[in-house]
Image (cartoon, rainbow, N blue to C red):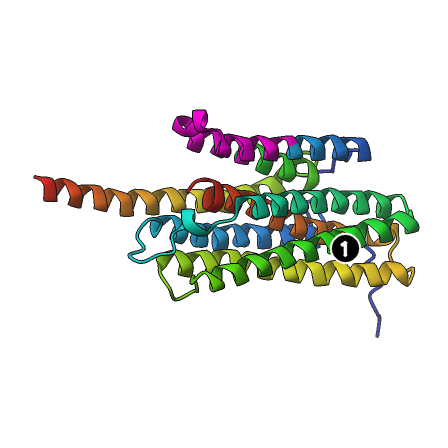
Amino acid sequence: MTEQSRPTAGAYLRVGAVLVILTVLEVGVFYVPAFRAVLVPVLLVLSAAKFTLVVMFYMHLKADSKFLTFLFGAPLLLAVGLMVALLFFFLGTLTLRGAAGAG
Amino acid sequence: MTHAAPLATHHTSMGLDSRKMAFWAFIGSECLLFGSLISTYLVYKGKSVVGPYPHDILNIPLTSGSTFDLLMSSLMMVLALAAVERGDMKWEKIWLFSTALLGLVFLGAQVMEFTEFVHKGLTISTNLFGCTFFVLTGTHGAHVAVGVLWLLTLWVRALQGKLGPANVTAVEITGLYWHFVDVVWIVIFTVVYLIQ
């Protein structure tokens, strides 16, 4: 498992420019009332894109061993799973209480 | 009595550098720490019975600036790594110091934000929002502070002329930590500040 070639300084600068554009889009979307209905999914997609770019290019996971991707990806998936499970558990409990109260 | 020769490299049986592998495992554990803190923030979101509430107090222009600052510091960090790899002593010092400086700017903005919140009546014990917000962003800020100290240590070594291509893994591991702090902020900025 050897490392592939690293990105060049030019590639780092291009990724930096994309990250800045995505951040400007995030803040822009936040302030534009027309996006209010789709604000959460749009922001989550933009945030995930920024996260992926930093991890793949600046942390070199794209070029490094797949085992390192596993070392990072497995706990990350566990953390996301934990987050989703807790949200479902607590929000689900509230919804059921609300439904029982209404019924 | 024979003495084993010191190992020049730290490769595992998988051909990976053991320090890098251990550090990625550490970053994995940090994912779980921040995952728990973000989950706690989300679970208690909107359940504060007294104000101030997030929409009353969060300063989006300031934190947008902080986000830009941290993204640029990540760019400086990879440029520092590239300079160390090619043995460019001048630019490794410049990029390492710039990265640390941008980290300090981020911390300064966070101190300003926290001070403003306290003046507006939001402390860690005011309500559920204050408690979960300060614990999450404070833990992240503490990580940034550790990163700044680590970067300054490397910068001092670079000033002493002790940071060359032989130390690439040390700089890369510092970079991994710094970029992780950046990606955590990317999530916090979206989840806490933009999705209110």
A85 or B54, nearer to the observer:
B54
Judge from the rendering whether residue B181 lies leftward or rightward of residue B137; answer left or right.
right
* Residue B4 is at least partly visible in this image: yes
**Amino acid type for the residue under numbered disc 1:** Ala
Give the residue pinned by disc 1. Answer: B170
Q: Where is residue B187 in the image (x, y as percent from the top left)?
A: 52, 43
Judge from the rendering whether residue B52 lies leftward or rightward of residue B88; answer left or right.
left
A62 w.r.t. B52: above or below: above
Q: Residue furthest front?
A: B120
Q: Which residue lies furthest to the bottom in this view?
A: B1
In magenta, the rendered stretch is: A21-47
In the rendered structure, does residue B184 fall within the stretch colored magenta? no
B35 w.r.t. B142: above or below: above
**Residue A69: quarter of image:** top right
Q: Position of residue B123 (x, y in %)?
A: 44, 64
Main SS class of the magenta portion in the image: helix
